[in-house]
Amino acid sequence: MRSTLLIQAGRDRADACRWVTLDGEGRPTGAARSGTPAEAAAEAGGMRVVALAPGIDCLLTQVHIPGRNRQKLLRAAPYALEEQFSEDVEDLHFALGPTLPGGDYPVAVVAIQRMNALLEPFTDAGLEVHQLVPDLLTIPCPEDSICVLMDGDVALVRSGPYSGFAVDAENLGMLLAAQLESGEDGAPQVQVTVTAGATRPELEELGQAVEVEHTNGSALDVLARGLSTPSIDLLQGAYSRSREWGRLWQPWRATAALLLAGLVLAHAVQGIDYVRLKRQQADLSAQIETVFKETFPATRRVVNPRVQMQQQLDQMQRQRGGGMQFMTLLARSGDVLRSAGDVDITGASFRAGRLDLDLKLANLQKLDELKQTLVASGLSVEIQSATTDGDQRVKSRLRIQGSGA
């Protein structure tokens, strides 16, 4: 599992916080540390970040609203609870927990101004908070018990899976007594954990035994042990991460729509070109087949006219003679004849792989030099005849073949 950075927002100073890192199993990897949000952000390193909201800023209650759509329920909750608040519900932030037996929903209520004050230091430090929960709901607490965590002079009380309150140490006894008197199933066990440097509460007025445990660790060390217990994520509604992504995505929607339209148009054009080229290919194949049938009418079965035509041409070439082809012989000997100068070609014929050239040259010496040059270029050359005409020029016939002939 992913490692977690558990960070506790400061109650009095926005630039002060405490944090501890947890491994994939939820175990602390070191002692809790104090500092600024920027210092905590430097240790986040891709971890899942869970922030604890001070319980003194959170009111935990319940509401009964029919329906299952979370967004509609979240919009309806403020008006179902507005009689419980002296403030305008428009100034309050509401977050719902999971459905309880009987159809009720646990609700955490925080002033919007306080929510902004809690999150702003983390945002300024570049720390992305994945979950924000009331610290009350991370106190480790057995079922049917009331658990108290003394953090300095503040008592954090968890009275149920989704219920609790925060109070100063002096008034803890009075509020706990009222909590116990309102219970319907008998007095639950009260467990108090006193952290290092915290005030020890006076609870004699409860009239029942209270289990008190002292720890040398900080309140954050205790809260880290209960992080996996049921809780309420305050990042809902206007503070939800999905809505934040929506706000970031909003300016790019038009650009993305244009890009998508461009891609669709490009694919459509490619599709049209593909269909057009396929039709052209079919037309060319039909024309090739027509030409093949007209050229070789004796061929009854046409499978691949282009390949079959090449085979027919090769066969015709072999029947006319082996060795080097006419064009190859002509090209190789032509290069030599052009460079020789003062050589006139008066006739040429090709048969059985042999190229016969009728030439007129200046003299016999020129004829011999021409022969040697042709031989040096890799050709087999034979002088068939050589006579001198009236203007003292030499008329000759050369038979040229490939050197392997």
Image: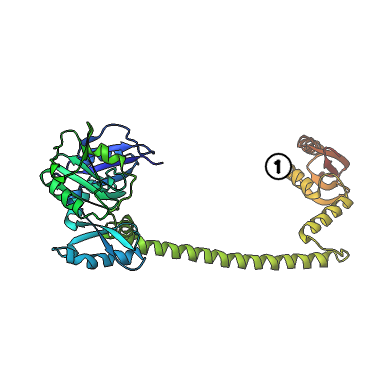
Residue 280 location in percent, x, y? 66, 67
Observer-nearest of 382 and 254: 254
The residue lying at 40 percent from left, 64 percent from top is: 257
Residue 220 location in percent, x, y? 24, 39
Can residue 256 be seen in this snapshot? yes
* Category of crowding for the residue at label 1, using alpha-carbon neighbours closer than 10 angstroms: few (below 14), some (14–19), many (at least 20): few
Q: Indicate whether 402 appears above or below 287.
A: above
Horizontal arrangement in the rendering, residue 109 relative to residue 367 (left or right): left
Image quarter of the N terminus: top left
The amino acid marked with disc number 1 is: Ser
Extreme-left residue of the structure: 170
Task: Assign a secondary structure to mark 1.
Answer: helix
Observer-nearest of 236 and 323: 236
Horizontal arrangement in the rendering, residue 130 relative to residue 346 (left or right): left
Residue 48 location in percent, x, y? 34, 44
Q: Indicate whether 86 appears above or below 4.
A: below
Observer-nearest of 371 and 174: 174
How many discs appear?
1
Observer-nearest of 185 and 232: 185
Q: How is the image coloured?
A: rainbow
Residue 45 location in percent, x, y? 33, 39
Image quarter of the C terminus: top right
Name the residue that disc number 1 marks.
339
Horizontal arrangement in the rendering, residue 96 relative to residue 294 (left or right): left
Can residue 19 be seen in this snapshot? no
Residue 4 figure quarter: top left
The residue lying at 25 percent from left, 51 percent from top is: 186
